[in-house]
Amino acid sequence: MNGGNGENSIVSSETYVSCKTLGPLTTSDIVLKQPKDSMSMWINKLDSNKQWMGMAPVAFLNNNDVLIPATETSQCSRFLPKAGVPSEDRSKN
């Protein structure tokens, strides 16, 4: 992983999917929204034995969707709203 220095760097070369559809999005659907803080945009990557493998960024979108590595869709529930809880609040946790 590279990045974090303000230049155009690759942070992750993984395939990302929508948490809402579990599929790819068109470029026009991808309008980024700033997370509450930088800690909100990172997830732990675990292998099949639940062993830590590193971290990966997620991307919050203006339509309240989240882009997440395709291998980590089980973590979408962390970002999508629960019934009765506005999605804006969930993306800030």
Image: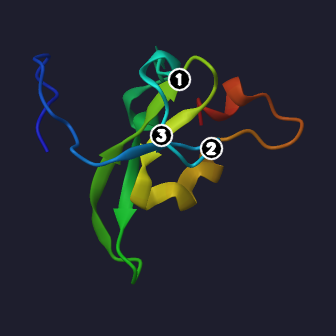
Instruction: Label 3: state its secondary structure.
Output: loop
- Amino acid at dot 2: Thr
Q: Vertically, is 9 above or below 21? A: above
Q: What x and y, as percent, mark residue 40?
A: 46, 35
9 relative to 93, above or below: above
Q: Where is residue 51? Give x, y as percent.
A: 34, 77
Query: Seen from this angle, which residue lies furthest right?
Result: 84
In which quadrant is the N terminus drawn?
top left
Other residues around mark 1 within 10 Å, as few (<14) / some (14–19) / many (≥20): some
Disc 1 residue type (three-letter)? Leu
Q: Which residue is tagged 2?
A: 21
Which residue in the structure is indicated by mark 1? Answer: 61
Frontmost of labels 2 and 1 is 2
x, y percent for residue 46: 37, 68
- Residue type, mark 3 in image: Pro
Q: Identify the element where label 1 is drawn.
A: strand
Q: Which residue is identified by label 3?
A: 24
- What is the C-alpha distance between the residues marked 2 and 1? 13 Å
Q: Are marks 2 and 1 in contact (CB under 8 Å)?
A: no
Estimate the x, y position of residue 8 in percent, counting from the top left: 12, 19
